[in-house]
Image: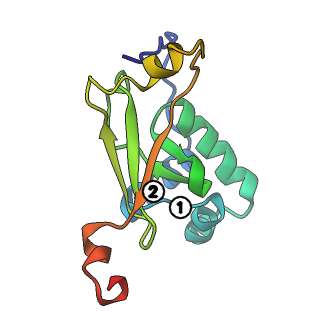
Amino acid sequence: MYTREKPLRRVRRMTHNQSLVLEVLRSERRAMSAYQILDALREHGLRAPVQVYRALESLLEREEVHRIESLNAFVACNHRDHGDLGGFAICDDCRTIWEFTLPEGAEITALAGSKGFETHQVTVELHGRCAGCKDSPKGR
């Protein structure tokens, strides 16, 4: 099973920008690019992409958000325990994300390790269509 050691560090309070970014991601419940987040927060005083990127960087470190590599987008974390190997099911139509934990028997890193590969990071992303989009007239 893939586990990672976390360094012990003091948890800092979130900044105003971090709170705004996290709130938008939680309310949208879908993957959003940094520029989509910026557009959603312009009326709250965020004007520059760097403000969003700094907030996202800190939220990633705090494991409050995840980066969806294949979309170059971000989503709020729905799990508090990051000890297990997780993944994301991504609807290609509405961009809704389902965060899940892989079963204990899913030995992805062991498979790579059997070939001498040393794994540093694992991102599992499944792409397809959610039940709502699959059953919509557009999907038929």
Q: Which numbered disc covers residue 25?
A: 2
User: What type is the residue that disc 2 sits on?
Assistant: Leu
Labelled pair 2, 1 in contact (Cβ < 8 Å) = yes
How dense is the environment of label 1, judged by Cα within 10 Å: few (below 14), some, or many (20 and up)?
Answer: many
Residue 82, which numbered label?
Answer: none
Camera-nearest residue between 81 and 56: 81
Q: Is residue 60 above or below residue 19?
A: above
- Please, which residue is most extreme toward the front here? 115
* Residue named by callout 1: 32
Residue at horizontal 34 percent and vertical 24 percent from the top: 84
For mark 2, give the secondary structure: helix
Above or below, comparing residue 114 to residue 20 in the picture: above
SS category of the residue bearing label 1: loop
Left or right: residue 13 compared with residue 99: right
Q: Position of residue 136 (x, y in %)?
A: 28, 84
| Distance from Cα at disc 2 to Cα at disc 1 | 7 Å
- Tell me if residue 88 comes above or below residue 27 in the rendering: above
Measured from the top left, where is residue 124 in percent x and y? 46, 40
Q: Amino acid at mark 1?
A: Met
In-image side of 82 versus 13 (left or right): left
- Is 40 displayed left or right of 108 in the figure? right
Q: Position of residue 16 (x, y in %)?
A: 55, 47
The quadrant in which the C terminus is found is: bottom left
Residue drawn at x 69%, y 51% is 51
Where residue 101 sits, quadrant-wise, is: top left
Q: Residues within 10 Å of mark 2 (few under 14, many from 20)?
A: some
Q: Which quadrant is the N terminus positioned in?
A: top left
